Image (tube, helix red, strand yellow):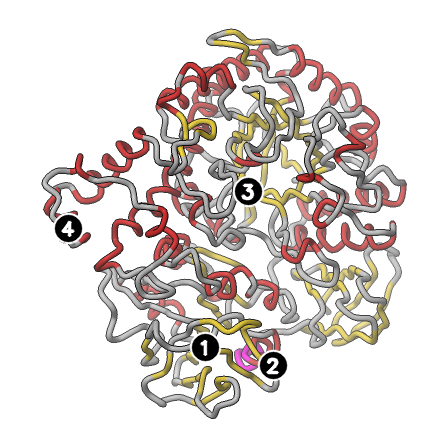
Amino acid sequence: MDCKVCRKDGNLQLLIDGEPQALSAYMTYNPRSEEYAAFAKAGVQIFSMGVYVGDRGINSFSGIHPFREGYCKGPGVYDFTQVDEDMERICRERQDARIIIRIDLDSPIWWDLCHPEELFRNYSGKSMRQSFVSVAWRDAMGTALCALIRHVEASHLGDNVIGYQVAAGKTEEWLYHLSFIGEYGDYSEINRQRFIQWLQEQYGEIQNLNIHWNQHYEDFSDISLPHPFRRSFCTEGVLRNPGREQDVIDFYQYHSEMMADAILYFCRRVKQETGGRRITGAFYGYVGELMDGEYGHHALGKLLESPDLDFLASPNSYMELRAPGIDWPFMSAVDSAFLHGKLWFIESDTRTNLTQPLASAMPSVCPDNPSYDFQGVWKGPESAELSLSLLQKGFGKVLTGRAGTWWFDMWGGWYHNPIFMDFMKTAHGMMEEDLLNPAGSAAQIAVILDDRSYAYFGLNTPVLSELVYSQRQEFGKMGAPFHTYLLQDLLHPEFPAGDYRMIIFLNTIKQPDDIRQAIQKRLQRDQKTLVFIYLQDRYDQHNKIRKDPITGFSVEYREEDEPVQACYRGVTFPPIPVSCPRFTKKDFIPLGYWKDTSIPAVGMQVKPEYTSVYSLAPHLPASLLMDLAMHSGVHLFSLTQDVIYANDRYLFIHASQKGSKRLYFPSFTRVSDVFSERQCAQWCTFMDFEMEQYETRAFRYEPQ
């Protein structure tokens, strides 16, 4: 059997022996035959199952116990009994099941005891499983991974397996094992030596490093890892000063690159062992969700450039504990992956009213502490109706967002309701239809992130959260779909610049000359609107402060300035005062002002070929984004700040408030309700109806 990801007519497909496969799947930590049977009956063919090399829980701080037995009992000693049982359990319910094995590669306890020098260490010397740079760990776990693949491929169910998802770190998501916020690592000697090697690759000679670091090292061997205090705080408030803190900037870029490097090592092992006939991927790249560089998720671009990786995955955002009435943003630049030919699976771990406490569902796994108490993010909605609405909402984002999904029935039984399973059948059918007749994009807004710029921000400031993490909530209310890319994608020859009328730049503080040229050539034209937020194009490729930023605005940042908020048409943003830059010239049209002043905080420059907008304050409100979108000619499907997901066939709306709703269509359109299959309107450009708070509705619209 041959499995691969291909692009056809501009769309990505998973091909299994040449046949396209709908990216709709099921996953659970608590494998039960009745749940597999229910999803198989709903049409789902792909099933993900967890396999563990080691014998520990999915994180190193909560005390959670293993979900399954580890199969590696010692060097070269393997017991695949439970792996075989779990595969048989799936295939009994669907003989033609397609299985993706998620294999957790964290080191077993016995391995740690044999290799204390290969372990991750915090600053005080405490060990937390393997160091991700450890060659010994990679070799040992790579050997165990290949042993599993050989066993599976030789079994009578070998042709049911289509891929291997490599996993490690906290909650299997390639996060460094940290016990608490404010803990720092990896201070092991092997990590220091690997950092030195990386620096030699970057700088070549110690004299070059000394110039960039403003130091006087005699040899690379003299270099130590940055102290936790310097990693947390920066000398100039929000941003690190490259003249004094280049070592910390380098360390954080290295820190993420090493995590990406570990992922690619195991993906290559999968490709080599399977002869390239199976797909492989990993959780990684949460550049919209994780602001803290300690987690190591800021080297997404490195993975996207690799031919050895076929897919990436992430959950929906846990913003506001998955509250109803708001968008649950994608954690990453999903559209960047699409551009680079990589699939993206959204792990839809959507809680329902059937969600039980871990202590009840899997008592042997639950730790004897409150880590998994039935509250906050672990607790589902009170009713089946709201549960169904949230399932529909999440699916709408996946269907219109060029992604696949696996329904993650974490402790089991979350979807064990005929109403939910009827929806799952409908959702799977819609994904199969889209597979055969793909819908086109309706996004006319692009959002640009830079995974490499995170290293320049301090960890003790709320600015990044307001600039990136929380800003996504406002994007979800602006009534129009949008795509998210990495900054370096502007150099990609297939970047679809012509699709977008408005481009929003978030944390792109460093824009090398080739990026600036791409912006000038591809974006500053055709009456597009470029929206720049906070500090933009501050540094050139030599880390020197630019005197002619691409924004066209003159700004300065002084750490001694008081934290402030801005106002736009009665809306104050961000929600809390933060340290912000200031304009030094008033060569623009003021759009917003600092709170309680007449001093501009948001400006617009209308040029012959394009419009440039600069907001000094982060976390732009939806009202401002909507006004800028209308100025740009972007089509807004809704003006009521409800959650909207759309492509050129489907339109989902999730009501943030009860009341009258009006949807606007790009042209005269015939509209039908997806779930009831009733026609709603004939040849209309807008449609009015009533909704309850948190209700979700889905429409199919067909232009005349």
Q: Residue furthest front?
A: 124
Work out whether 194 lies above or below 462. above
Residue in the picture at 79% in, 60% down:
696
The Cα–Cα distance between marks 2 and 4, rounded to whole angstroms, is: 47 Å
The Cα–Cα distance between marks 4 and 3, rounded to whole angstroms, is: 44 Å
Residue in the picture at 77% in, 66% down:
655
The Cα–Cα distance between marks 1 and 3, rounded to whole angstroms, is: 34 Å
Residue in the picture at 18% in, 53% down:
212
Is any atom of residue 662 visible in this view? yes
The amino acid marked with disc number 4 is Gln
The Cα–Cα distance between marks 2 and 3, rounded to whole angstroms, is: 38 Å
Callout 4 touching callout 3 (CB < 8 Å): no
Stretch of the chain drawn in magenta = 628-633
Residue picked out by circle 3: 343
Membership of 341 in magenta stretch: no
Q: What secondary structure is the magenta-colored segment mainly?
A: helix
Give neighbour class at mark 4: few <14, some 14-19, many 20+ (Cα, 10 Å). few
Give neighbour class at mark 1: few <14, some 14-19, many 20+ (Cα, 10 Å). many
Q: Tell me which numbered mark, 4 or 3, is placed earlier along the sequence.
A: 4
Residue picked out by circle 4: 215
Q: Tell me which numbered mark, 1 or 2, is placed earlier along the sequence.
A: 2
Q: Secondary structure at mark 2?
A: strand
The amino acid marked with disc number 3 is Leu
1 or 2: mark nearer the eye: 2
4 or 3: mark nearer the eye: 4
| Snapshot quadrant of residue 600 | bottom left
Residue picked out by circle 2: 571
The Cα–Cα distance between marks 1 and 4, rounded to whole angstroms, is: 36 Å
The Cα–Cα distance between marks 1 and 2, rounded to whole angstroms, is: 14 Å
Residue 648 location, x and y as percent?
Answer: 66, 62
Work out whether 258 lies above or below 242. above
